[in-house]
Amino acid sequence: MTTAPIGLIAILRGLTPAEAPAVGDALYGAGLRAIEVPLNSPDPLDSVRELRARLPGDCRVGAGTVLTPGQVADAAEAGARMIVAPNTDPAVISAAAELGLDCYPGAATPTEAFTAVAAGASALKLFPADHIGVSGMKAWSSVLPAGTPLLPVGGVDEANLGDWLAAGAAGAGIGSSLYRPGDAPGAVAERAHALTACWARHTR
């Protein structure tokens, strides 16, 4: 485990391959360097391929809502270097580790958090974060192995991102407050600039 900040992850649920290049450019131009395409989006692996081919190497492109080891392999073949799951499944975590991919499994309880750490998770996705809360994350931090990166996902936006970062979050996944299906790239860029500015203010 590392205490280095992971940063903001753009969650592009509902993205289509046709939208991917322009939305990817908008996010990268605003300073975001991690993009997740959930597998319950239209043709998600094609979007992963589009983003990976389009964006510079310092931008991590990954797959989200990954539920099986087979999906891990498919995502890796498409160019994903980051695997995000809504749940804690040691088989998925192990499959990602075997392929050298970062893996952020979802955990909603301390038991799931410890299971994910033991399985080799790169970081823990606190999901849904608005149910766990900042106080819950602080409590988890006090008992998890030192330096375990925690990433709140679910209900995180510009208004509360600073609270999560001040409490020790290593980053955050940003979904509908950043991107909704069909959003114009310019609108996505504007929201992304606001989020990266917030990140910069709280991580100096």
Image (cartoon, rainbow, N blue to C red):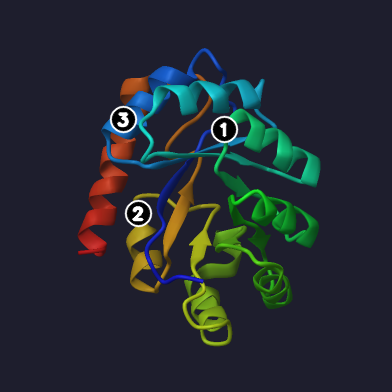
> Where does the image place residue 108, in percent across and percent down from the top left?
67, 66
The residue indicated by pointer 1 is: 79
Quarter of the image for residue 109 reads: bottom right
Residue 113, placed above or below residue 61: below
Q: Are marks 1 and 2 in contact (CB under 8 Å)?
A: no
| Residue drawn at point x = 50 percent, y = 19 percent | 182
Q: Are marks 3 and 2 in contact (CB under 8 Å)?
A: no
The residue indicated by pointer 3 is: 189
Separation of disc 1 and disc 2 at Cα?
A: 33 Å
Quarter of the image for residue 202 reads: bottom left
Q: Nearer the viewer, residue 56 or 30?
A: 56
Q: Are marks 3 and 1 in contact (CB under 8 Å)?
A: no
> Where does the image place residue 198, in percent across and percent down from the top left?
26, 53
| Residue drawn at point x = 38 percent, y = 36 percent | 57
Q: Quadrant of the C terminus?
A: bottom left
Quarter of the image for residue 113 reads: bottom right
Q: Tell which circle, 3 or 2, labels the residue nearer the N-terminal end.
A: 2
Secondary structure type for disc 3? helix
Which label lies toward us, 1 or 2?
A: 1
* Amino acid under disc 3: Ala
> Where does the image place residue 139, in percent across and percent down from the top left?
54, 83
The residue indicated by pointer 2 is: 159
Mark 1 neighbour density, 10 Å: few (under 14) some (14–19) many (20 or more):
many
Separation of disc 3 and disc 2 at Cα?
A: 17 Å
**Residue 38: which numbered mark, if any?**
none
| Residue drawn at point x = 42 percent, y = 64 percent | 170
